[in-house]
Amino acid sequence: MNLESIRGQTLNKNTQQIFLTILNSIQKCINNSKYSEEKKIHEVRKNIKKLRAVLRLVKYSGNIDTNKYWDKQLKEIAQSGSELREKYLMLNTLDDIVESYDLEINIIYFDYLYNRLTQDYNMLKFVLFDEMHLWESINHKVNNLKNKKDDIRLLSKGEKVIEQNLVMEYQKGREQMSTSQKDPTFKNCHQWRKSVKYLWYEIRILKIFSNIKLHGYLKKLHNLSEILGDAHDLSDLKTFLKINFENKQLSELNSICSGIDCLWHDKIDQAFEKGSRIFKENSDQFMKKFKNRLQN
């Protein structure tokens, strides 16, 4: 059963079925022998974000303790493979930054950095899959959550709560964009990225509850999220290099970090340009337009 096929049931049934469908997707993914370990982690994390988006949409319309329990369990599953995902992205980003800016880097030094990252990455893979048996652990946690699916009970005013929480998420994204424009630090831009991703997932989930048509808006949100994600990966790489290689061939390291800074600022400028169009309306205007699309 896919998510589109469950539209039109009661809000409670819809929500429970969404949870079950996505949890089944996670198990199907980790048991897919055609997927690489990296793809499995990526797909699991995407599905966890969908589930957390549902929780955020229905927040305060059900049992708060149940919501907290689910959110805690979902966070643990998502975080279990996050470090490996980050190292995988660092390897790709290191290649990109050198190629993008055609930096004149000592090839021996570049190979040293790349090999060190690869060594750390392979060691982490060994720990996760051979010692910690990551997929068995995730499968066990998913089964526990599936058994608790019926604990999700929403109040009769659930639809109204969903509307309110969506507006709150939009307003948060708008405010965090403003904060990032005034002070474009990694921390501020990371918080903005999280709000954009949550808003994107929540609207995608809301489409399951209704016939709302927001494909164009979703595409713009996703594009903004991807740009901010690229900036985040660049920041992660720079932090890793600074911590681990600060005292080794400093001039070469500074050259790479300068390239990272240039590309990071390019990405953030792109994000501000797109974000200013996406978040140009205040929350009341956003909700009015949103309701009109719900009614059409």
Image: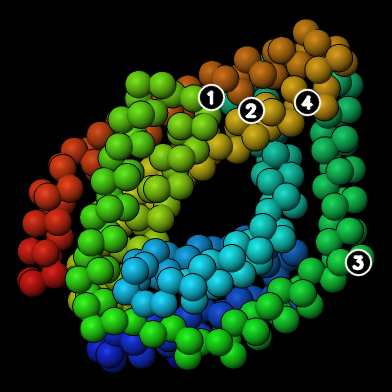
Q: Is residue 39 visible?
A: no
> Which type of secondary structure does the marked residue at label 3 adopt?
helix
Q: Nearer the viewer, mark 2 or mark 4?
A: 4
Q: Is residue 181 visible?
A: yes
Image point 27% across, 53% down: which residue?
Answer: 168
Image point 84% across, 57% down: which residue?
Answer: 125
Image point 44% across, 83% down: which residue?
Answer: 152
Q: Earlier in the sequence, mark 1 or mark 2?
A: 2
What x and y, as percent, mark residue 267? 46, 30
Image point 23% across, 55% down: which residue?
Answer: 167
Q: Return the residue at label 2.
A: 97
Q: Return the residue at label 4.
A: 243
Instruction: Tell me the crowding category of disc 4: few under 14, some 14 to 19, or many 20 or more residues within 10 angstroms, Cα based.
Output: few
What amino acid is found at the position of numbered circle 4 in the picture?
A: Ile
What amino acid is found at the position of numbered circle 1 in the picture?
A: Leu
Q: Earlier in the sequence, mark 4 or mark 3?
A: 3
What x and y, as percent, mark residue 147? 59, 90
Q: Return the residue at label 1.
A: 263
> Which type of secondary structure does the marked residue at label 4 adopt?
helix
What's the CA distance linking mark 1 and mark 2?
8 Å
**Left or right of 168 in this view: 148:** right
Q: Which of the labelled discs sits on residue 130, or is there none?
A: 3
Q: Earlier in the sequence, mark 3 or mark 1?
A: 3
**Left or right of 7 in this view: 234:** right
Q: Nearer the viewer, residue 229 or 109?
A: 229
Confirm or deny contact between disc 1 and disc 2 (CB under 8 A). Answer: yes
